[in-house]
Amino acid sequence: MKRSIFLLVIISGFILILFACYFPNLAISPGKLSSGHEELVKSCTNCHSYFGGVQSSKCVVCHKIDQIGLVKTNGTAIVNLKNVENSFHKYLLTKDCFACHQEHKYLKFARSIRRFDHNLFAIDVRNNCILCHKKPVDELHKEINDNCLTCHKLNKWKPATFEHNKYFVLDKDHNTSCATCHPQNNFKAYTCYGCHEHTYEKMIDEHREESVKDLTKCVSCHKSANKHDMKKEGGSEGEGNSEDHKDND
């Protein structure tokens, strides 16, 4: 009796293995395929290897890396491209397709959500957003070239992290073109000598009595156009009333 049960178990297991090998889409598929791969529902080995899982090397048989997102596998051009003017896939450090893509629509409770990770790109590509993204066309951004990471982060575009008021308040006299203070769109540096009100010689005369010699770090003292609202370098906010920072007029 025990022997018969044992043989029945062995035979049943063997049948299940054969069934899984010949009809994996019915036996072990975790869910429906994405719309672009529905036609492969009965051709699991196009992407999978027996006991070897999915392999990116099989993806590139149909999908050419430099054409992904631009041309369909049948050679037809993809129209209505939103932001990508060329295939960003060619900039990836790794060709591991499954770092981002998951083709089976898993059951809801077992779904694995994979977010795109910009760290898959080399640092020089990560710092050049316009390789893949179109620049915003509002008044502020049209003056800015490839300095996105000055204000934005790769893991979350909004909200922007930069607050100009933390460095210098843009009042009616200073709310001017970005290039006036940031020549050549270099927002890691600034100058106050892009305006006719400020010349180096004039500032030397005004600051000589304060014993200020370094006139390249204006915002270390000045946080706004109010000359009484100053911060002594190395001091704390609100020291604008100290004797050595008072205006003598």
Image (cartoon, helix red, strand yellow):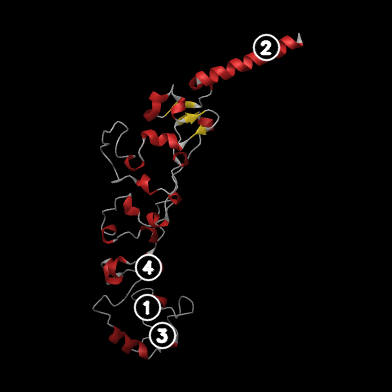
In the visual, does 68 lie left or right of 56?
Answer: left
Q: Which residue is mark 3?
A: 245
> N-terminal of the two: label 4 or label 1?
4
Name which residue lies at 50% across and 18% down: 22
Q: Establish if 2 lies above or below 95.
A: above
The front one of 96 and 226 is 96
| Rendering coords of residue 242 (x, y %) | 45, 84
| Rendering coords of residue 186 (x, y %) | 33, 67
In this rendering, does residue 8 appear at all?
A: yes
Q: Are marks 4 and 1 in contact (CB under 8 Å)?
A: no
Q: Establish if 41 lies above or below 125.
A: above
Q: Establish if 48 lies above or below 20.
A: below
| Amino acid bearing label 3 | His
| Rendering coords of residue 144 (x, y %) | 29, 61
Distance between the alpha carbons at the discs numbered 3 and 1: 14 Å
> N-terminal of the two: label 4 or label 3?
4
Name which residue lies at 41% across and 35% down: 59
Mark 3: secondary structure: helix
> N-terminal of the two: label 1 or label 2?
2
Q: Are marks 2 and 3 in contact (CB under 8 Å)?
A: no
Q: Which residue is mark 2?
A: 8
Q: Which residue is mark 1?
A: 218
Mark 1: secondary structure: helix
| Rendering coords of residue 122 (x, y %) | 42, 54
Quarter of the image for residue 219 reads bottom left
Distance between the alpha carbons at the discs numbered 4 and 3: 28 Å
Name which residue lies at 30% across and 60% down: 145
Distance between the alpha carbons at the discs numbered 4 and 1: 14 Å
